[in-house]
Image: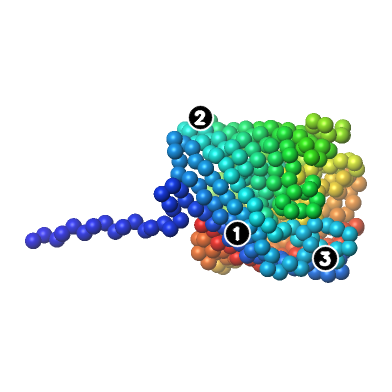
Amino acid sequence: MGAQAQPAPAAPVNPWALEYGTFSLDSRLRYESVDDAGFADTATALTWRNRLGFRSKAWHGFSVYVEAEDVRALIDDYPVSAAAGNTRPVITDPEGAEWNQFNLVWDSGSGVKATLGRQRLVFDNHRFFGNVGWRQNEQTFDAAAVNWTLPNNGVLDVVWLDGVHRIFGRSHPNPALREWDLNAPLLHYTQPMKYGSLSAYAYFVENEDLVAQSARTMGVRFAGKVPTDTAWQPVGTIEYARQSDWADAVSRDDQDYRLLELGLAGPKGHVVKAGWEVLGGDGRFAFQTPFATLHAFNGWADRFLTTPVNGLDDRYVSWTGPCGKVNCALAWHEYESDRLAVNLGREFNASVGYAFTPRVSALVKYARFSDADALADVDKFWVGIEYKR
């Protein structure tokens, strides 16, 4: 008698998938310490952030995504807002629970995708629009967005913003920091090219709560990599943008943004770069990027979340790559004002990350800002662990 065929093994059960959709979870526990020479005491925080999401199964291309976010402080020796009498520096991780995302998505299946409702919005490298994912309370937008992949593989994004929910939380004592009502059409186009990608953008932001921050920003960006026969390959980014008043903002002179970054990408993920980023300023107004993931730029000490009125000139070198079984990063920044060349200090950044599993990772991170003419020295330290599913 011949051997009987054995039944195929059953597919593993995904406990997160239900008949009508799939759940997601992002849980992060993080300790942060801030020692700022401008304050008498050190701020310390141990916060636990959880995001639980559910995406429905698609029906005729339509699906719904909803995501709740909750932040709790297990150690709360820190203020979440600047106030007279603070003896500790601010750590912007407020406690609270809120709807982080709630949107309706339509996917044509042929290159057109539309999203309506509260959503995450990221363009390019987060320099102008990002989700500020470093903070525990994420930044999301009330928006109508259409993403269109063209026959030439170019991608056109047409977005209208109605509002932004900021990282300071719904309970912040200053209502101007909680959320902003916006009237903001955004256009962004990316074209893949042989050695990289070219982006062009035009952002017309009317801030109905802070009229003076209304601005028009238009620019172009190229990021690329040149393949060679050697182990190390040249990489680079060049970007230019111009910002001017818009809607009912106070009339002001236009300001420029310039970025030049050159480097080498080597084996095993090693990347070394040297960069020069300039945000212009004239002593009254400066080039601002209030919707950016600002922590990713101009140093992790977050000394320049608002561009000084004389502008900012940031010259830096960085290296990222593996250190044995962990991922390492180092960076050094030298700052001065774009106008008058005032010394704005220097900064050292270092981090070590390790992935225990594809879903569980840990990060240790340090920033040291010092030697500015008019800004206090600061040391920041973080250690965190995160689970994503």
Give the x, y percent position of residue 35.
80, 67
Residue at 51% x, 36% y is: 106
The kind of residue tagged 3 is: Arg
Q: Is residue 263 above or below residue 158?
A: below
* Left or right: 247 in relation to 93: right
Q: Is residue 29 above or below residue 289?
A: below
- The residue beneath circle 1 is 50
Q: Quadrant of residue 376?
A: bottom right
* Left or right: 317 in relation to 105: right
Q: CA distance from mark 3 to mark 1?
A: 26 Å
Frontmost residue, 206 versus 274? 206
1 and 2 marks in contact (CB < 8 Å)? no
Classify mark 2: helix, strand or loop.
loop
Crowding at mark 2 (Cα within 10 Å: few <14, some 14-19, many 20+): few
Looking at the image, how many numbered discs can be counted on the residues?
3
Crowding at mark 1 (Cα within 10 Å: few <14, some 14-19, many 20+): many
Classify mark 1: helix, strand or loop.
strand
Residue at 15% x, 59% y is: 4
Quadrant location, the N terminus:
bottom left
- Mark 3 or mark 1, earlier in chain: 1
Give the x, y percent position of residue 64.
52, 42
Residue at 65% x, 46% y is: 140
Q: CA distance from mark 1 to mark 2?
A: 39 Å
Crowding at mark 3 (Cα within 10 Å: few <14, some 14-19, many 20+): many
Q: Nearer the viewer, mark 3 or mark 2?
A: 3
Frontmost residue, 59 versus 185? 59
3 and 1 marks in contact (CB < 8 Å)? no
Q: Which mark is residue 88?
A: 3
Give the x, y percent position of residue 12.
37, 58
Q: Residue furthest left?
A: 1
The kind of residue tagged 2 is: Pro
